[in-house]
Amino acid sequence: MATNRVESMVVYVSMAILFFINWLNYVDRSTLIGVLPDLKNGTQNGFNKYLSDTEVAFLQTGFIISFMCFAPVFGYLGDRFIRKRIMGLGVMLWSLFTAAGSLAPNYWFLLAMRSMVGVGEASYVTVAPTIIADLFSARLRIRALSVFYVAVPVGTAMGYGIGAGAAKIANDTLSENYTASHDLMEPWRFSLRVTPVLGFLCALLILCILKEPPRGQSEGVNVRGALGIRGYYDDIIYCIKIPSYLLSSLGFAMTAFGLGALAQWAPLFVYKTSRDGGHSYTNTETNIIFGIITLLGGLSGTVVGSELAKRLCVKIGPAAYFYVSAVGLYTSSALVYAALTVASHSIAAGFTIIGLVVFSSCLGLAPVTAVTLNIVIPERRSTAAGLQMFISHILGDAFSPLLIGVVSDAIHGDDKSDHAESLSLQKALYITCFAAAFGSAFYLAGTFFIYHDVHQLELYTEEHSSKSETICDGDDEKEPLNIDSYRSSVIVDYSVNN
């Protein structure tokens, strides 16, 4: 009894560490967004250069490009080496490059440092969900993932406030002697000097306290040692041949497209719109309000989505994960259009609808990851996570903020007035409505394949279970799968286990 209590404590301490680092990850991503007006202003950014929407968007695009390119690399490493060491090194790297970005003498140095932050964060985001999969059984996994992904909206929301707040404190505290160009003490820089301290602390927590479980522990399987480069090619082919994995990745890419664009540009859109309408919101006030809305909408959406999917599994089986994600994303498509249209008439109504957009978009965060972990064999899960990150970002937020910035610049041209920039951002952000609708269609298509793909993992588990490793049934010919009867058995099984 005491041993079980200690083991449970170790599991939940490990989960708490993973949550905290994921929270810090998304805080780090959004702190710079909280100071965009200062960063764009040529008299306040220390670069003596006004930054266009396109240049600002490149800061996020550069980060995402490096993130998505290195995610498959860390997926390869995560299936072959000690995962906690990979994550610890990654957290140290992203903290170091974030701190270096605060010392940027010009725009190009800042762009390079923000791009390198993506390398470090790719190591953590790719590997951490696979550790959760090994800590928790399939029955408990979606709840554990919902806790992990609650950090996404919470961290993003707090990042807006932390970035804007750090800049405001610096602006109010520092003397006028530190406002000169090139002294590296402009207020916006302090938004990048908060998370590195916590980052190095998190690296120590990973390396010294985090308990890494054996791969496949939650399924009770004996995992073979992962192969080298040739084996990695086989892993990639294995993943893309799973229909529900591919469709969930495409659906998540459309989710990332919309959320990435909105996270980058929605606060600035609201700020410009409020100034154009005479509401006189400051940048700090706008980011704090936006952060609170993101926090409430994202937190409730992530929790409700995971619980709703879990309960629907009792009725319809694992297809519930796709249905919840599809309904949430399709709803967000209509809500984004409403928020952008209404904001120019009522900022309060616009804020409210944006909160509902975040809620509906976050419904599928945990279910989509649960799909991947529930259909991919344990020794290929890091590869699957890395490849999914690559697909979702290269088709999603790797270029969506940049696209919105380019379209916005093209619309307002040389007119830098609040009205022109507000109107141009509004029109550009309408693009995200179409992406959400396409993503919903991908999720719905996944419902036709999920039962078959779950069954394939069950067969693998039976063959490699440590409880039956001495039984050799390799020569037995298995009956072909009857998908209708299997769907019924899956629903009964989910009902019993939940």
Image (spheres, rainbow, N blue to C red):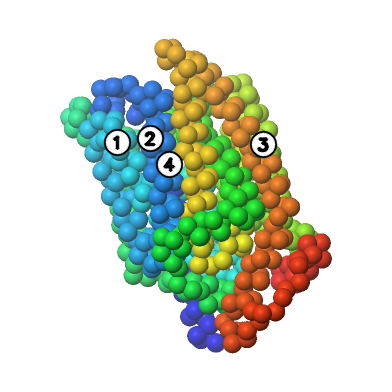
Q: Nearer the viewer, mark 4 or mark 2?
A: 4
Residue at label 2?
Answer: 59
Q: Nearer the viewer, mark 1 or mark 3?
A: 3
Nearer the observer, 154 or 286:
154
Amino acid type, callout 4:
Ile
What's the distance in space between the residues labelled 1 and 2, CA to CA? 8 Å
Instruction: Indicate the secondary structure of the residue bearing disc 1.
Output: helix
What's the distance in space between the residues labelled 2 and 3, CA to CA? 27 Å
Q: Residue at x 57, y 21 (%)?
A: 427
Q: Nearer the viewer, mark 1 or mark 4?
A: 4
Residue 454: quadrant of the picture: bottom right
Q: Residue at x 54, y 18 (%)?
A: 423
Q: Please, is residue 51 above or below residue 173 in the view?
A: above
Amino acid type, callout 3:
Ala
Residue 128 visible somewhere in the drawing = no
Image position of 495 (left or right of 23)? right
Amino acid type, callout 2:
Leu
What's the distance in space between the residues labelled 1 and 3, CA to CA? 35 Å
Callout 1–callout 2 Cβ contact below 8 Å: yes
What's the distance in space between the residues labelled 4 and 3, CA to CA? 23 Å
What's the distance in space between the residues labelled 1 and 4, CA to CA? 15 Å
Residue at label 4?
Answer: 64
Residue at label 1?
Answer: 110
Q: Residue at x 35, y 24 (%)?
A: 51
Q: Residue at x 53, y 77 (%)?
A: 222
